[in-house]
Image: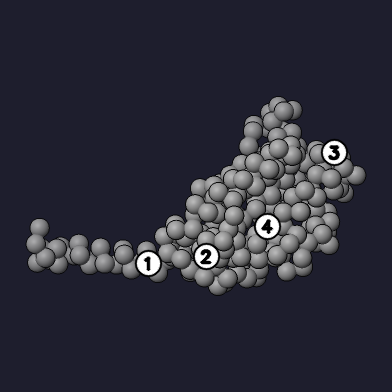
Amino acid sequence: MNLKSLLSTGRLFRLIMTLLVFTMSRSPLQASPDKYVDPYKDYDETLFMDMDLEQNVMTPAVSQGDHAAVSHYMKRLGTQLTRKGYTVDLTRNDEVIIVTIPSDDLFQPNDTLLSPSAPGLLTPIVSQISGDPAWMKVVYTVHTDNTGSESYNQKLSHARNSSIYDWLLPQVNEQLIIIPYEMGDSDPIEPNDTRRGRAANRRVEIFLIPGPKMITQAHSGLLK
């Protein structure tokens, strides 16, 4: 089909508009991964607080050229945490670590205060984030099973989040960005119709996300 035909049918116009909408809809905080963008730009807690979980996990982005160094570092750290007994997964193409801790290991049943054993479980993770506040961004989610009403589970999730947050803040640099999410029973990973499934759903997930300092070092060839 020639250009005249395209113009007469309006196809070219629709193609151009589609490309414009796609370009304009891209968030400046989610730059193309094959292009290096200063990771300190827009690294702002107030912006992150307005993002949903998926957006936060994707930000800041790592350029394609720096991916190998970042993923190598995070996989090595994930292996270290696994050896300490944590349940560890990698996401975002092996750039982000997810550490899952059963809520039953952090709280007594239906309680909202951290158990005496909780600091021992959280401290090894804190040791990875308590240095330079620009090294990592931390996001964590607090989940419940579906026992009780939705509002009850949301309140339980909120109260447990507060206990974790209050314990965590004095342990780390005050400039470290920590974004919590209170998920309630909204995101089960197992059916809630068995005791085992409910226990799996009661969990805290901690996302360790590359911060601007790590990304900058990767870009400079200094990340080991």
Q: How far apart are marks 4 and 1 (CA)?
A: 29 Å
Mark 1 vs mark 2, CA separation in Å = 29 Å
Q: Tell me the SS state at disc 2.
A: loop
Residue 149 image point, x, y percent: 75, 43
Helix, strand or loop for disc 1? helix
Lower position in the chain sequence, tag 3 or tag 4 = 3
Find residue 135 and report its image quarter.
Answer: bottom right
User: Disc 1 or 3, which lies upstream in sequence?
Assistant: 1
Q: Residue at x 74, y 37 (%)?
A: 85
Q: Mark 2 or mark 4: which comes first in sequence?
A: 4
Instruction: Kindly state the secondary structure of the residue where label 3 is placed.
Output: loop
Residue for badge 4: 138
Image coordinates of residue 95 in percent, x first then y, are 55, 51
Label 4 residue SS: strand
Residue 208 at x, y = what percent?
A: 65, 53
In the image, what residue occupies the spot 55% across and 49% down? 72
Q: Quick check: 174 above or below 147?
A: below
* Mark 1 residue crowding within 10 angstroms, few (<14) / some (14–19) / many (20+): few
Mark found first going from the N terminus, 4 or 1: 1
Quarter of the image where the C terminus is located: bottom right
Question: Would you say 83 lies left or right of 27 here?
Answer: right
Residue 145 visible, this orientation: no
Residues under numbered marks 2 and 4 in contact, where contact means CB atoms less than 8 Å apart: no
- 14 and 221: which one is in front? 221
Q: Which of the two residues, 127 or 197, is positioned nearer the viewer here?
A: 127
Which residue is denoted by mark 2 in the rendering? 220
Mark 1 against mark 3, which lies toward the viewer?
Answer: 1
- For the point 55% across and 54% down, which residue is it? 70
Three-letter amino acid code at disc 4?
A: Val
Asked if labels 3 and 1 touch by Cβ distance under 8 angstroms, the answer is no
Mark carried by residue 23? 1
